[in-house]
Image: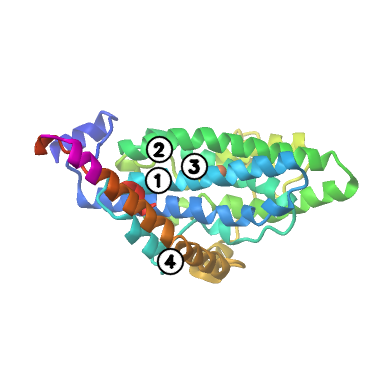
Amino acid sequence: MRAFEATIAADERIEPRDWMPDEYRASLIRQIAQHAHSEIIGMQPEANWLTRAPSLRRKAILLAKVQDEAGHGLYLYGAAETLGVDREELLDKLHTGRQKYSSIFNYPTLTWADVGAIGWLVDGAAITNQVPLCRCSYGPYARAMVRICKEESFHQRQGYELLLALSRGTEAQHAMAQDAVNRWWWPSLMMFGPPDAESPHTARSMAWGIKRHTNDELRQRFVDICVPQAESLGLTLPDPDLRWNEERGRHDFGAIDWEEFRRVLRGRGPCNEQRLSRRRRAHEEGAWVREAAAAHAAKRAARAAATTTTPEATPAPQTTGARA
Ligand SMILES: [Fe+2]
Ligand SMILES: [Fe+2]
């Protein structure tokens, strides 16, 4: 206990073999699992446009981005496993609705411009949330976030560049970009979670160095970043109350519809059912891949064991790949 507290106080990292309080472990598992689930569910809205990307270049970019998100899911499930949970168990909790994913992915992607709005706003909000997590007190999570953030910044830029091309295009293209921003702006602000006063885990997560800033602080930072970017895009943000506050040195913005947030979180968003049923189906259809990977890992382990003379030197079987 003392070693744990000293490590946290010194702003150093807790590693998998270190002692940690049960609630610290449980809190991290909950957060990392929810994060991992969001990465893989988040592949769906954009994958919807892979076959309809307007050019080969756009298709290649989008393919790379969607694959990155699968990779983020893998790093994060891996990080969660270092806390002693099983990946199958986490996926089962996702599939049965016992663990959540970010409410943002329950909104539909109606036009090609949505791919741009998601990159600019959704990946942008994700970066704002995740950059401080690179300094999270749990080592494996912090290290996974370093790599994820580098890739997220590419995602944000491709979205911005896509929207810029549309905004400077024909009148119809400009209108399509504006419409996408209008629909994605408010849900993006909800990505930072409930207001601080209603956020049950914030204080403890901050004391443990899991979280570095509150939901409202991060949301404010995101708004301040987006306003000048929207201007250079030639697009407006759909908030009549949005204005610079000289005194605070930040932007004021309008009230968020938290009722909508709770509704989507409770499973009654526009796409909740579709997202979960597609995820379950993908998991079932991938069963043969998991079986093949497990058989391959077992074969390699058996071969390695046969070539090793002393039993002490036998490497542990490589089973992690089997559970992807
Ligand atoms: Fe991601
Ligand atoms: Fe991303």
Answer with the quadrant where ligand 2 appears in the image. top right
Disc 1: which residue: 76
* Amino acid type indicated by mark 2: Ala
* Residue drawn at the location 72% of the way across and 36% of the way down: 161
Residue 170 locus on image (x, y percent)? 89, 44
Q: Is residue 267 above or below residue 130?
A: below
* Residue drawn at the location 60% of the way across and 66% of the way down: 271
Disc 2: which residue: 144
6 relative to 179 in the view: left or right: left
Q: Are marks 4 and 2 in contact (CB under 8 Å)?
A: no
Disc 2 is placed on an element classified as helix
Q: Earlier in the sequence, mark 1 or mark 4?
A: 1
Mark 4: few/some/many CA within 10 Å (<14, 14-19, 20+)? some
Q: Residue 46 colored magenta?
A: no
Q: Earlier in the sequence, mark 1 or mark 2?
A: 1
Q: Earlier in the sequence, mark 4 or mark 3?
A: 4
In space, the residues marked 1 and 2 are separated at their CA atoms by 7 Å
55 relative to 270 in the view: left or right: right
Q: Earlier in the sequence, mark 4 or mark 2?
A: 4
Q: Is residue 128 above or below residue 204?
A: above
* Amino acid type indicated by mark 3: Asn
Q: Are marks 1 and 2 in contact (CB under 8 Å)?
A: yes
Please state which of the two labelled residues, at mark 1 or mark 3, is closer to the viewer.
1
Mark 2: few/some/many CA within 10 Å (<14, 14-19, 20+)? some
Disc 3: which residue: 129
In space, the residues marked 4 and 2 are separated at their CA atoms by 24 Å
Q: Are marks 3 and 2 in contact (CB under 8 Å)?
A: no
* Amino acid type indicated by mark 4: His
